[in-house]
């Protein structure tokens, strides 16, 4: 079983994989299209699992986890291509939620 990786390690894994191909990373617009495509596939899986739309017998089996993984891969490619650390982006957004939005939602007692 593989050990859990940090986001920086995941970004390095993706970069190592992409770097072996002459084509390298897709352009930013192509990656946006790929993210949109993957988001649609994730939405379809969620709809099959939780919604009223069952899969057709001809459709491949897929899972929400698999579609999230595909989405994460393309998001990581985009971040790498833009030289963005997803760990830093995560820290920045969590700081925003913990300051600006700290009183926005009803807290569960004892959880702060």
Image: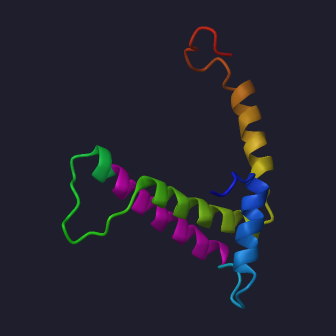
Residue found at the far front of this picture = 1
The residue under the point 63% across, 9% down is 110
Q: Quadrant of residue 96?
A: top right
The residue under the point 67% across, 68% down is 77
The residue under the point 48% across, 64% down is 38
Residue 105, image x, y percentages? 56, 19
Q: Quick check: 103 above or below 27?
A: above
Q: Nearer the viewer, residue 21 or 82?
A: 21
Is residue 41 highlighted in magenta?
A: yes
The residue under the point 60% across, 71% down is 31
Residue 109, image x, y percentages? 59, 8
Q: Quadrant of residue 21?
A: bottom right
Residue found at the far left of this picture = 57
Q: Quick check: 108 above or below 95?
A: above
- The magenta segment: 27-46
Quadrant into which the C terminus falls: top right
Q: Quick check: 78 above or below 85?
A: below
Residue 29, image x, y percentages? 61, 73
């Amino acid at each position: 079983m593989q050990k859990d990786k940090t986001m920086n390690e995941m970004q390095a894994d993706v970069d190592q994989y992409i770097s072996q191909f002459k084509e390298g990373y897709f352009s930013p617009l192509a990656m946006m299209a790929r993210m949109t495509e993957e988001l649609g596939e994730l939405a379809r899986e969620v709809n099959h699992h939780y919604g009223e739309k069952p899969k057709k017998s001809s459709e491949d089996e897929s899972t929400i986890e698999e579609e999230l993984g595909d989405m994460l891969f393309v998001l990581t490619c985009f971040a790498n291509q833009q030289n963005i650390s997803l760990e830093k982006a995560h820290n920045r957004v969590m700081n925003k939620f913990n300051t600006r939005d700290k009183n926005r939602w009803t807290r569960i007692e004892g959880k702060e």
